[in-house]
Image (cartoon, helix red, strand yellow):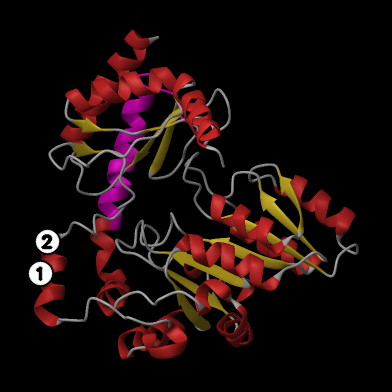
Amino acid sequence: MKKEILIKELCDLKSTNNFRKLKECDNSLINLSSNDYLGIANDKDLLNEFYSKYTPKLSSSSSRLIDGSYSEVMQLEKELENIYKNSAILFNSGFDANSSIIETFYNKKSLILTDRLNHASIYDGILNSEAVFMRYKHLNMENLEKLLIKYRNSYDDILVVSETVYSMDGDMADLEKLIQLKKIYNFDLMIDEAHSYGVYGYGIAKELDIVNEIDFLVIPLGKGGGSVGAYVICSQLSKDYIINKSRKFIYSTALPPVNHMWNLFILKKIPDFKDKMKKLQEIKEYTFALLKENHIETISSTHIISIIIGDNSKIIKISDNMRKKGFLLYGVKEPTVPKGTARFRIGLNPSLSKEDISRFVKELKYEIDTIF
């Protein structure tokens, strides 16, 4: 692409307040934008315990099919299979896992029905697969069922894709209803638990005991898991096919042993995090009560709270002002979210105190009232 075109596109982004820049994280600020929902990644006691027990290597130096299936990663997959009672395979990221599953298993003869607000990694996989796809209205099971009725006999296979907790709206899918529809219309089902793993123990699907009803359960670890990488829970047949056909799996250097030993360490400790989960629930309820008291509207119902401001320039101004008051609060701007819905996306965690939240809501209320 010509340099002049690049410059023009970047100038256009600046003119609409959509230009992105990297900013170094200031750890002195109270962080309301983190995805570390259980505070695992920054738990010094956990880190000290881990490093006192293990000294794993810092590089795998190979793909899984050559020398990257080291003992630690094999132990982790085995432990996952014991917990989820199905086969498990690891990817380097949730993005790779989501896109790889779709582009590996589906093609031009497939139909993919995807929730309108599904993650970009899902849409990348859809585009790479060249499958026909249709978006159903967000969390609208009636709209999904209408599409299933209309197209159930028109394609070789149908895949329905949903997340559990949605990161931009902070709402939840009805997994049990999706399973009911699957039993009626016999489609493949793919579920992304990026924003529910850890917060709901081993994930909502595991809590509801419906793992075996889901063809591809994707569990990215960069949020509540406090780590990196992603688990895919699937059948042994699907696992074998991924190993032999998934380009992102075959040609990627495996994550280092230190990452997967940490993942295994945390996986075994999930039952011990009930206090963290309880504290998160208490902070969530307290935050919602304060928002309601201060007449700050939200469409959310989970530990992710979305507050729509509606304008990129206002988002930037409020974010800068909140930073000066000691809070890290990043805005989510257009076009990441639809036009007119630029918002703050608050990620709660159990390390936040009620005093922190009380002061935060008070300052946010002031900013919203004065910036408008």
**Residue 362, can we see it?**
no
Bounds of the magenta span? Answer: 277-298
Question: SS at mark 1?
Answer: helix
Which residue does the image show at 17% across and 36% down from the upper left? 29
Q: Which residue is mark 2?
A: 44
What residue sits 51% from the left and 47% below the top? 166
- Report the Cα–Cα distance between label 1 and label 2: 6 Å
270 on left or right of 296 = left
Instruction: Pick the residue in front: 3 or 366.
Output: 3
Q: Quadrant of the N terminus?
A: top right
User: Could you tell me residue 303's position as x and y percent?
Assistant: 38, 45
State the image coordinates of residue 12 (x, y, percent, origin top left). 51, 24
Please tell me whether residue 24 is drawn above or below residue 203 in the rendered image: above
* 80 with respect to 266 (left or right): right
Tell me, yes or no, if residue 359 can be seen here.
Answer: yes
Where on the picture, by quarter, is residue 101? bottom right
Q: Does 39 appear above or below 238?
A: above
Query: Which label belongs to residue 168?
Result: none
Residue placed under numbered mark 1 in the picture: 48
Horizontally, residue 190 falls left or right of residue 273, namely right
**133 to 30, vertically: above or below:** below
